[in-house]
Structure formats: C-alpha cells, structure tokens
Image: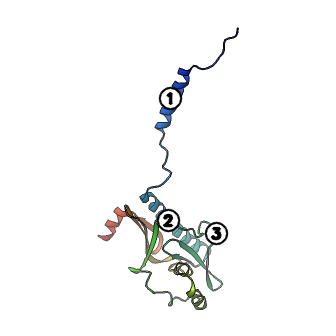
C-alpha cells in the first residue's frame, strides 16, 4: 500500500501564520490620501506645470497663459491672434479633486475683481463679448490671468490651493514672481513669508 504524501494541518497553519506575519510587516499605502497629501500633490503638480510652461514658452518662442477657476485651471496659447486652450498632456485641463479649490491673487487682490482683462492687447474683444453669456467658470478659463511669456517673464501671482471641509483645512501657496521658477510653500513656510 502506498503512503499518501501531503501536508499536515499543523504544517499548513504554520505556513499561514508565517505569511500573515510577513504581510503585517509590509506597509501598504492608504487607498485614500490625507487632505494634506492631496493638497500638497496638487500644489506641486501646478508648480511643475507652470515651470514647464515657462520653459516651453522660452524654447518655442510662444506666449502662454494660465487661467485659474475655482475647481480647475487651464493653460492657453496665443496663436492666430487669439487664446486657445492647450489640449495636449501634460497641459490638458483636468478638474481638481472634489474638496480642493484654487484662489488666484494678482497684485495682492483676488481675481474676482475685474482688473487687467480689458487693458491687455492680447485679448480678443469680440470673443470676450461672445463669452459673456457663458457660466462664470467657463468665462474665467477662456483668457489667461497669468501670462507666461517667451521672454521668460511670468506675471506675478499667488495661487492658494486649499482643502477645506468641516474637520480639516489645509492651504498651500503657489507663488510666481516675474520669472521662473515658481515655488510652492507649505503652511509652515508661509509663516516665514509673512515675516
């Protein structure tokens, strides 16, 4: 009679315990990011894109712009006498995560005030009038508020990237000052900026 070969129940349990212990040693990243991590990632992404746009404008001798809405931002290119959205990655417009918002400040003023838009030569007045009937978010994204010029200059700006709900409030600051590179500041670094 042949003897059956196999594992005993104790051997199987021992292997399961060892595998369970090894798995517990490995840290799996959380499937959902903390608000701080999410805002930091979005602020770093925006900073990298503005710096890349500045390089592209300089290398390709193009006039680019950044338009900022509350829930998204768009990069635009000045071609054929009008501003056109850039539709190729990495500059393609994507909405922000649900609880992340943007606030653009130019010259220390919130962009919600009508300034600059009528005094800039690169604005197509007919298109501006045609867009007047669009919702505010679409209208804001039709023309740049931040100019990224082929000379390497960037119009100065502050963009607050904020996560705000009932429990948590986190704000990173993306700041551009006349030329690239643009910098991102976490909440602790912002305290040093104010001093």
**182 in relation to 23, above or below:** below
Structural crowding at the residue carrying mark 1, measured as other residues with C-alpha within 10 Å and reported as few (<14), some (14–19) or many (≥20): few
- Image quadrant where one finds the N terminus: top right
Q: Nearer the viewer, mark 1 or mark 2?
A: 2
**Residue tagged 1:** 18
Q: Nearer the viewer, mark 3 or mark 1?
A: 1
First in sequence: mark 1 or mark 2? 1
Residue, far right: 1
* Total numbered badges shown on the rendered structure: 3
Residue 54 rendering spot, x and y as whole percentages:
54, 72
**Residue tagged 3:** 88
Dot 1: what SS? helix
Structural crowding at the residue carrying mark 3, measured as other residues with C-alpha within 10 Å and reported as few (<14), some (14–19) or many (≥20): few
Residue 103 rendering spot, x and y as whole percentages:
44, 74
Q: Nearer the viewer, residue 107 or 126?
A: 126
First in sequence: mark 3 or mark 1? 1
Dot 2: what SS? loop
Residue 52 rendering spot, x and y as whole percentages:
55, 68
Q: CA distance from mark 2 to mark 3?
A: 23 Å
At x 62%, y 84%, the residue is 82
First in sequence: mark 2 or mark 3? 3
Scheme of image coloration: rainbow
Quadrant of the image occupied by residue 104: bottom left
Q: Which mark is on residue 98? A: 2
Q: Is residue 84 visible?
A: yes
Q: CA distance from mark 3 to mark 1?
A: 49 Å
């Amino acid at each position: 009679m042949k003897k059956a070969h196999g594992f005993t129940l104790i051997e199987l349990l021992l292997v399961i315990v060892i595998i369970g212990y090894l798995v517990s040693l490995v840290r799996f990243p959380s499937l959902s990011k903390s608000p701080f991590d999410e805002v930091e990632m979005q602020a770093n992404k925006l900073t990298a894109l503005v710096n890349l746009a500045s390089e592209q404008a300089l290398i390709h001798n193009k006039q680019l712009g950044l338009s900022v809405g509350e829930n998204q931002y768009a990069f635009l290119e000045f071609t054929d006498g009008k501003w056109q959205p850039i539709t190729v990655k990495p500059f393609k417009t994507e909405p922000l995560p649900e609880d992340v918002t943007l606030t653009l400040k130019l010259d220390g003023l919130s962009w919600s005030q009508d300034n600059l838009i009528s005094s800039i030569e690169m604005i197509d007045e007919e298109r501006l009038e045609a867009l007047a009937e669009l919702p505010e978010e679409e209208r804001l994204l039709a023309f740049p508020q931040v100019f990224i010029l082929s000379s390497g200059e960037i119009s100065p700006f502050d963009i607050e990237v904020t996560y705000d709900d009932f429990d948590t409030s986190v704000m990173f600051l993306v700041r551009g000052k006349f030329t690239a590179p643009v910098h991102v500041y976490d909440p602790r670094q912002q305290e040093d900026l104010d001093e």
